[in-house]
């Protein structure tokens, strides 16, 4: 169970999309017309369309013909950092005897999904042979179908598992009867949710599991039944657009401010001026002096000078429109969120980061597990009925994960262009690359894409920094609520892999362990009835708990799930200029807006949200020369801090504001509805802009009666407006 403890100690001693938009929202769910009451919700031999049921409607799915998922047999417990990842062994075994081509890899590529699963991408004419070869590997437990939604490129694995929720007050004998009649057996109950179980079929497998779940939803004693989907929400690459835009080119990276000299590489700095989402005025003032800024150091000097001048003058009289959260002012009128616990349900949370290690909530609960200290990791599946054996007490990297990520990062620095292309271009990617793209350009794209993906595996670390980073000796990054405490709760394995059951248990865990605020910087997952019921139950049982979630990064006029669930505060993203960030979902379900960053804006890299990263640890760089410049979206030379964009970062900014508010709520008197009402009523549209394109889009939708004309254009794109932390804190204190 405690397989991560050794490596974590090493990391502490060594002192490490969607993922520009991590965790990337690939799409928003769009529903078909409701199915009539007479329709039986099962797939028949004459109905080849795959689907599952959500709110009585069919959500169509498509099986990927060139992709197979693999579940590995459990590895022996080890503390060694030299353990070989099974996905690499499988790739090696499958490539044995296959042909290679001049510009690209072999006929197969294997990508990890967490530690226990992987996705195998095949060529179209060799599927049968590869499937047999996969099943013959002694370390493979089973092969599974891979699905996708019709309007996206996400990866959805279908294990032989269903999350089954029974209605309250039904007897154990009734449960047993339903299970027996449907050839099901209980794997284990879900933690924190009575009458909810993971079950598996004894007779069905593959896509037939969808049938079984759909049939269960017809039973009166069943609240809901959904496949226990394993999803990867970071597996989609829009390679054509990326290459055409040059978003990942070396030239775009060179546009970052340079340091004056290598002697400054190791210096710690006060980055507060860069964090424009806390106070946008200094950066806006310095950007007006671009010609005077020749290096990163000169930018830092400008920011410090402007901050000092602004302290001496009346900031309110600035002619520059404020596009920030007014956080620095809120700090003067608050305790910084002291005493407030914010649960971060996310991916790798490296809480040994210098700016985070003093911001951890130490779990105190009567039923806490022996090794449970700082949160819990639900990312890896478990069939154990013992709560303390479900998951892990450490949300940081395991030795196996370290090996996977370090290998990839070092490949981008060590491999030649040809070697990199051969190893990392999948057959599916290769078919989409234009012949005019040069080898150098493709390799350049791959290097920066891989580095960015590695950095974004630490999405939980990035998000945590936005909420509650507290720099040592005032050098580093600041969180919105620096005195609040973070409860780390991990649900994502590598490559954005997440189980429906893990996600539900994580939300229950956070509420059970005393979280005052839950941040969910995730979305575009398949919504399920069992998940929605879990949210409803948690919110009903905890009326003072505030759940904040990202609206989504699909530029769609409806928010993604879970931000679309009732009672969850949905947050969209704006940029430094006061525009809606071009990726941010808007419209139906959007509550408020907050700075989320925009690397494509005129501010460039400086338009991102700077926060705490995970690639800074020496163990990543062992055997490599010290980086001579910034790479990908790093603020510093090793990735201790990163510039990011996405609603993934506007959401924790608002979670931090809620923490500031709760810190001033003497006696914890305000409930969730009251706090959200204050947030909305103190938000506003000052400094926000609507483009001509958006104006036209709004008018068209009003004319078509797709939206009521009572909804103003600003409400449509910004909800109740841009959060004002200072005003919200003052309102609470009144």
Image: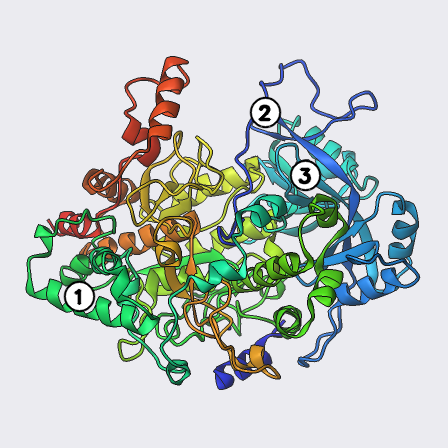
Q: Are marks 3 and 1 in contact (CB under 8 Å)?
A: no
Q: Assign a secondary structure to mark 1.
A: helix
Q: Position of residue 618 (x, y in %)?
A: 53, 81
Mark earlier in primary sequence (3, 2): 2
- Looking at the image, tell me whether mark 3 or mark 1 is earlier in sequence order: 3
Q: Could you give the CA–CA distance between mark 3 and mark 2, rounded to whole angstroms? A: 20 Å
Occupied quadrant, residue 332 = bottom left
Residue under circle 1? 307
Q: Is residue 445 left or right of residue 295?
A: right
The answer to which of 328 and 105 lies nearer the viewer is: 105
Residue 662 position, x and y percent, is 24, 54
Q: Residue at horizontal 55%, vertical 33%?
A: 29
Residue 652 point in image, percent of width and height: 37, 54
Instruction: Pick whichever of labels 2 and 1 is earlier in the sequence.
Output: 2
Q: Is residue 360 left or right of residue 75?
A: left
In the image, 498 versus 415, the foreground residue is 415
**Callout 3 crowding tier (Cα within 10 Å): few <14, some 14–19, many ≥20:** some
Tell me if I can see residue 620 in this picture.
yes
Residue 228 in sight from this viewpoint = no
Inter-mark Cα distance, 3 to 1: 49 Å
Task: From this view, report whether residue 177 is shown above or below residue 395.
Answer: above
Q: Nearer the viewer, mark 3 or mark 1?
A: 1
In the foreground, 173 or 399:
399
Query: Nearer the observer, disc 2 or disc 1?
Result: 1
Q: Which mark is residue 148?
A: 3
Q: Residue at x 30, y 50 (%)?
A: 576
Q: Which residue is mark 2?
A: 56
Placement of 338 over or under 629, stated as above or below: above
Badge 1, how many Cα within 10 Å: few under 14, some, many 20+? some
In this image, 586 relative to 165: left or right? left
């Amino acid at each position: 169970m405690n397989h991560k403890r050794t490596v974590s100690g090493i990391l502490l001693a060594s002192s490490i999309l969607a993922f520009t938009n991590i965790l990337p929202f690939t799409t928003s769910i769009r529903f078909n017309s409701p199915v009539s009451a007479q329709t039986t919700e099962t797939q028949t031999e004459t109905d080849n369309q795959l689907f599952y049921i959500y709110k009585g409607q069919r959500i169509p799915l498509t099986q990927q013909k060139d992709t197979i998922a693999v579940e590995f047999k459990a590895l022996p417990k080890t503390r060694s950092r030299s353990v070989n990842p099974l996905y690499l062994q499988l790739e090696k075994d499958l490539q044995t005897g296959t042909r290679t081509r001049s510009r690209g890899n072999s006929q197969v590529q294997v990508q990890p999904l967490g530690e226990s699963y992987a996705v195998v991408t095949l060529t179209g004419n060799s599927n049968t042979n590869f499937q047999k070869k996969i099943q013959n590997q002694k370390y493979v437990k089973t092969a599974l179908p891979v699905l996708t939604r019709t309007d996206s490129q996400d990866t959805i694995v279908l294990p032989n598992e269903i999350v089954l929720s029974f209605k309250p007050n039904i007897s154990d004998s009734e449960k047993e009867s339903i299970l027996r009649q449907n050839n099901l057996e209980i794997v284990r109950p879900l933690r924190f949710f009575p009458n909810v179980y993971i079950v598996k079929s004894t007779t069905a497998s593959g896509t037939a599991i969808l049938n079984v779940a759909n049939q269960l939803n017809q039973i009166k004693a069943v609240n809901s039944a959904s496949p226990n989907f394993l999803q990867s929400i970071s597996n989609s690459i829009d390679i054509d657009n990326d290459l055409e835009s040059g978003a990942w080119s070396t030239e775009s990276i060179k546009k970052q401010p340079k340091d004056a000299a290598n002697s400054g590489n190791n210096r710690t700095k006060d980055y507060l001026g860069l964090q424009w989402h806390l106070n946008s005025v200094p950066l806006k003032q310095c950007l007006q002096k671009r010609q005077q800024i020749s290096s990163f150091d000169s930018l830092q000097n400008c920011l410090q000078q402007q901050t000092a001048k602004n302290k001496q003058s009346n900031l309110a009289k600035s002619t520059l429109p404020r596009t920030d959260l007014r956080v620095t002012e809120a700090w003067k009128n608050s305790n910084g969120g002291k005493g407030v616990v914010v649960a971060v349900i996310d991916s790798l949370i490296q809480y040994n980061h210098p700016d985070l290690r003093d911001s951890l909530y130490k779990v105190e609960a009567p039923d806490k597990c022996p090794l449970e200290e700082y949160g819990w990791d639900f990312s890896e599946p478990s069939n154990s009925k013992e709560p303390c054996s479900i998951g892990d007490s450490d949300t940081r990297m395991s030795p196996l994960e370290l090996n996977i990520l370090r290998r990839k990062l070092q490949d981008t620095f060590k491999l030649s262009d040809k070697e990199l292309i051969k190893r990392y271009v999948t057959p599916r990617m290769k078919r989409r690359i234009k012949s005019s793209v040069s080898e150098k350009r493709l390799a350049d794209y791959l290097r920066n894409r891989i580095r960015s993906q590695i950095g974004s595996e630490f999405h939980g670390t990035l998000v945590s920094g936005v909420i509650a980073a507290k720099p040592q000796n005032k050098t580093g990054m600041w969180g919105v609520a620096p005195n609040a405490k973070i409860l780390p709760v991990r649900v994502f394995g590598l490559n954005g892999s997440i189980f429906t059951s893990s996600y539900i248990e994580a939300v229950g865990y956070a509420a059970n362990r005393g979280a005052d605020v839950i941040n969910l910087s995730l979305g575009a997952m398949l919504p399920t009835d069992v998940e929605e019921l879990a949210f409803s139950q948690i919110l009903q049982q905890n009326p003072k708990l505030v759940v904040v979630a990202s609206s989504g990064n699909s530029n769609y006029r409806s928010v993604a799930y879970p931000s679309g669930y009732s009672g969850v505060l949905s947050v969209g993203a704006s940029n430094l200029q006061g525009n809606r960030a071009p990726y941010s979902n808007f419209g139906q379900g959007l509550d408020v807006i907050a700075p989320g960053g925009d690397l494509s804006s005129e501010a460039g890299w400086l338009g991102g949200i700077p926060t705490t990263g995970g690639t800074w640890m020496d163990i990543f760089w062992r055997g490599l020369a010290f980086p001579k410049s910034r790479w990908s979206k790093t603020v510093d030379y090793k990735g201790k801090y990163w510039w990011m964009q996405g609603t993934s970062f506007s959401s924790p900014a608002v979670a931090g504001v809620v923490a500031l508010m709760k810190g001033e709520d003497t006696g914890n008197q305000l409930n969730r509805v009251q706090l959200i009402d204050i947030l909305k009523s103190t938000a506003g549209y000052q400094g926000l802009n609507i483009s001509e394109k958006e104006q036209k889009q709004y008018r068209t939708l009003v004319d078509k009666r797709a939206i009521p004309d009572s909804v103003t254009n600003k409400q449509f794109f910004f909800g109740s407006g841009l959060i004002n932390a200072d005003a919200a804190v003052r309102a609470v204190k009144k």
